[in-house]
Amino acid sequence: MVPHLITALTGPTNELEQRVLDSMPAIERWFRLEWMEHTPPFYSSVDIRNSGFKLAPVDTSLYPSGWHNLTPEMLPLAVQAAMAAIEKICPEAKNLLLIPENKAHNSFYLSNLAQLRRIFHMAGLNVRIGSISPEIKQNTTIALPNGESVTLEPVQRVKGRLLLKHFDPCTILLNTDLSAGVPGILEDLREQYLLPPLHASWPVRRKSRHFQSYEEISKRFGKLLGVDQWLINPMFAQCGEVDFAQDAGMECLRSHVDGLLTKIRRKYKEYGIPEKPFVVVKADNVAAGSGIITVRDVKALDVLQEQAKKGLKTLPAAEVILQEGVLTCERMHDAVAEPVVYMMDRYVVGGFYRIHAERGVDEDLSAPGSSFVPLAFDHSTHLPQPGVKPGASAPNRFYMYGVIARLAMLAASYELEATDPQAETYE
């Protein structure tokens, strides 16, 4: 069952919601058949932007934090999904080792670990948190604002297995994207399941590969619904390494920005959209830097290049992805907002709104100053309501968000299959 999240509905709606509701049986069957052929990521979260004329994922995390933002009402679904995920991978699992980020001292992040520990404990596992940080040399207990505490224990590697004192897990859950690189302690483990696999981490992963998979899926899904796949797919392009300060890769960047803006203008004209198109340029892998720049005109790149040559901060030298900018029409407490949907195995388990009072409708909200508004579940009597006018039903809106998030999750499964070093290849 897909949960339906509640919040105040604002902003324009479109025909897409009606198509999704009318096609619900076909959509669920389509997903069911896909999951017979493909393995979903162990857990994931998807940032979605709703511009009123377009609804699309803009980022997919395969090592999601922020689980503490899910409300208690969401936990039963998360626990059920955790049970299904563990049963599929290691039915006899007894002990689970949770490995956090090395710099795990922020109280929000530690609260996220406590929530994950709670979910898997209720799913029937003994859960302990083991740090691979060289700074953690002995058990370190940290109190949380809500009265809970988290104990970080130093991980030992013995005969190819990761252990804690008096604790030998069969399953290891990473809650770090390893953006600084894959440490040797995690490689070539002996008879232990590492989730997600190492090739899901940023030293291997590329956003362009993910959105290439998503584009393929959105084309098939658009055909199923009888809608233009552009309505759910952010167009993108990719460049090799770009360095503003050294003038490396700038011709490629200019060419792709110009081409992408032209394509977006064409689509806006087709749909009678009065907004000004923009392109978002960001690192193709987070490890190279998380800077994001917004470009509305190719000439803006010259200004950014001049700033970089003067030593002012722009995008770090990196492989880059250029993505069609998607506005957000969502509002919470008069602040710009975007929904973030959380999944475990193939199930939507909850979500929240990321809001930012100081950001505009065309800006990245995942920045200092952002806050989170949990999305509560609708009551069981308010399942998706076919026949209700588009935009008038919260359950219908959030069912649609869950569909888009699952499309991104499916794209991640395609992506992981393509980069799996253990996968068999056939000529």
Image (tube, rainbow, N blue to C red):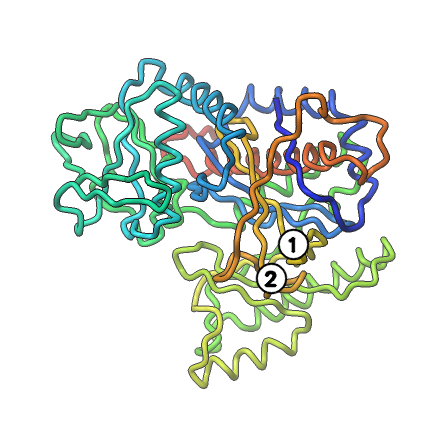
Q: Is residue 315 left or right of residue 296?
A: left
Amino acid type assigned to the residue bearing label 1 in the image: His
Give the number of the disc on residue 333.
1
Q: Are marks 1 and 2 in contact (CB under 8 Å)?
A: yes
Q: Quadrant of residue 64?
A: top left
Which residue is tagged 2? 357
Residue 287, given in percent of the width and then of the height, sits at 39, 56
Camera-side residue of 387 and 188: 387
Q: Is residue 336 left or right of residue 247?
A: right
* Distance from Cα at disc 1 to Cα at disc 2: 9 Å
At 23% from the left edge and 31% from the top edge, which residue is drawn? 189
At 68% from the left edge and 68% from the top edge, which residue is drawn? 258
| Mark 2: secondary structure | loop
Answer with mark 1 or mark 2, whichever residue precedes in sequence. Answer: 1
337 over 306 or under it: above or below: above
At 68% from the left edge and 32% from the top edge, which residue is drawn? 399
238 over 372 or under it: above or below: below
